[in-house]
Amino acid sequence: MSSLRKHTRESFFKYMPASTAVIVLGNKTLRWSAPTEFNDPYDVPRELAFDISSAELQEEISAYMIRAVQEPNEEIGHFLSVLQYIIEAARRATPDTKAEILEALKDEAAKKTGESRGLDELRDMWRKLIPDFRILCLCESPSSISMWYHYAAKYSGVVLELACSDESDSPWLVAERVEYPEQAPGVFTARGWAELTMMPVRAAIDHLFHAYAYTKTPDWSYEREWRIASFKRPHEQGPFSDYQVCPTDFRSVYLGPLIEPSAKERIVNLVKERLPHVQLYLMHFGMKRRVEFTSINS
């Protein structure tokens, strides 16, 4: 098993118009996009810590630390080691000593807010990073009517199946499932940002990145999306990057029921000539309100 593998899935699916499928299969590439090109305006937020002031953040950091001292059951295992030590000591201290430590923690909260060099600088850094992200969006199933309509040109497009191959170290081995929580992640609040300041830097960055890149609003849950998030390479320009796909990672091609005959013929010929191992299927609207597929390889 590949050391890259983060899940047990055998494959993922990519919905697209027929014209895009011709390019993908012909060039054996897939397009990774910057979030600026996404159709969901809330996907990978363009603003960091929106509508949170430095004063509000300082207040929340102070309250967070005090709560950790006063409530012994409050989990602090994800805090910086030095903060864990101080909080544990405060929990065992006499009332007078505890009061002194709490005052010191308030001072630490002010220091932490100042050390951030201002939220405005962090926000500016995030705005500059957004165009450099490269994200590939994948789906769990080739049978989603909504996905066929919205992403495969109203049933006239194509769905590609991409094998998760341990032998070729397929990029999709590192794909992570997108979450659709009813409540926005904590990083959208001052309290959530206060928690981030308590963590080691690497853990805080990972937590922030996951919340921003791998969560979407519940409206999009029908997509059953998985994705891979990365950054553009130094020489790349623009909001897209086309990366090579190992030929053996192409497993199947599903043609929409309304695909243009000329597009169908071109794709079938491409597969047979350049990717003969790939299975070809034609999608049908089953009479039991279920998508059906018929093999057309022969």
Image: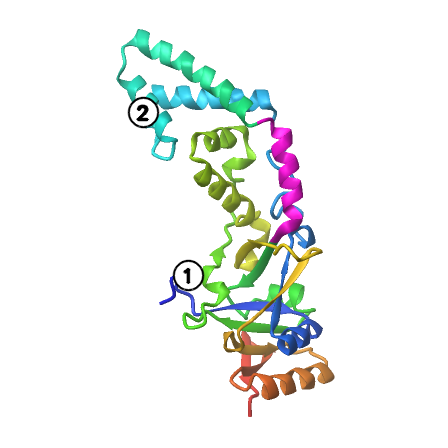
Q: Nearer the viewer, residue 166 or 210?
A: 166
Residue bearing mark 1 = 4
Which quarter of the figure is the N terminus placed in? bottom left
Report x, y in % for residue 187: 53, 36
Is 132 magenta? The answer is yes
Residue bearing mark 2 = 85
Which quarter of the figure is the C terminus placed in? bottom right
- The correct choice, above or below, for 196 with respect to 280 in the image is above
- The correct choice, above or below, for 76 with respect to 296 in the image is above
Residue 296 is at least partly visible in this image: yes
Report x, y in % for residue 33: 64, 57
Q: Secondary structure at mark 2?
A: helix
- The correct choice, above or below, for 296 with respect to 286 in the image is below
Nearest to N terminus: mark 1 or mark 2? 1
Q: Residue furthest top?
A: 96
Report x, y in % for residue 82: 36, 26
Q: Secondary structure at mark 1?
A: loop
- The correct choice, above or below, for 28 with respect to 121 in the image is below
Residue at image location 63% in from the left, 85% down from the top:
268
Is 75 magenta? The answer is no
**Three-letter amino acid code at disc 2?**
Tyr
Query: Which residues are the magenta region?
Result: 117-133
